[in-house]
Amino acid sequence: MDQHEFEQFVLENGKNILRFCRLTCQDTESGDELYQDTMLKLLGKRQQLDSQQNVQSYALSISILLWKNKKKKYANRNRLIPMESMDAMEHDKISELKEESAPSPETCILQADEKKMIQKIVADLPEKFRIPIHLYYSADLSIQEIAETLKIPEGTVKSRLNKARQLLKKELEEIGYDR
């Protein structure tokens, strides 16, 4: 992969990878740092990459490995010196409605609260369910691509996505969400 192909890859896939990194870290600053580390590592391996390969899947697997390594490092440090809890993830702006009329302020607030509530529940899911959910919904990867990225069978990806959806539904029902 040459410099131009790498730049094109970043333009086309950078936002999805950044979103995945931020959701994985549950913190904008840490997510940005993970994104930079991922891109630096990918840039270093650029000569080994073939533009015909699924480079996005490879980049996401790099970010997962870097995140797990960083998580282990902080867990070891946290045993010695407890760290304060991380700030809540900075949320993206509410997506624009397709309708021509602007939504009311109440609608915007309700949508933002709903989004925060769902993101909090997803963030509290166990890692083995949370990562496939982020890859599927945030990075827009197919089940096959997720399986390749995580190096697990497609059936396992499907069952983890299904279980994550069930857990999400259960949590939403418990708090009275009726949509």
Image (cartoon, grey):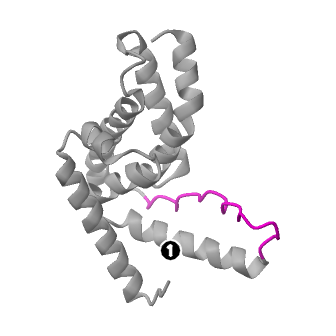
Magenta region, residue range: 84-103
- Vertical order, 119 against 40 (above or below): below
The vertical placement of 56 against 21, above or below, is above
Q: Residue at x 45, y 30 (%)?
A: 37
Q: Nearer the viewer, residue 108 or 144?
A: 144
Q: Position of residue 101 (x, y in %)?
A: 82, 70
148 displayed left or right of 91: left
Q: How many marks?
A: 1
Q: Secondary structure at mark 1?
A: helix
Is residue 82 at all visible to an observer of this figure? no
Q: Give the quadrant of the N terminus.
A: top left
Q: Is residue 79 left or right of residue 124?
A: left
Is the stretch drawn in magenta largely helix, strand or loop?
A: loop
Residue count near mark 1 (Cα–Cα under 10 Å), binned few <14, some 14–19, many ≥20: some
Residue 2: give x, y in percent of width and height. 49, 9
Amino acid type of the residue that numbered disc 1 sits on in the rendered structure: Met
Residue drawn at 49 percent across, 36 percent down: 35
Can residue 171 be seen here? Answer: yes
- Most distant residue in the bottom direction: 176
Please give the name of the residue rendered at 31% of the width and 44% of the height, measured from the top-left corner. Answer: 146
Residue position marked by numbered label 1 in the rendering: 117
Relative depth, front residue between 71 and 115: 115
- Residue at the outermost front position: 99
Q: Which residue occupies the foreground of this view, 46 or 27? A: 46
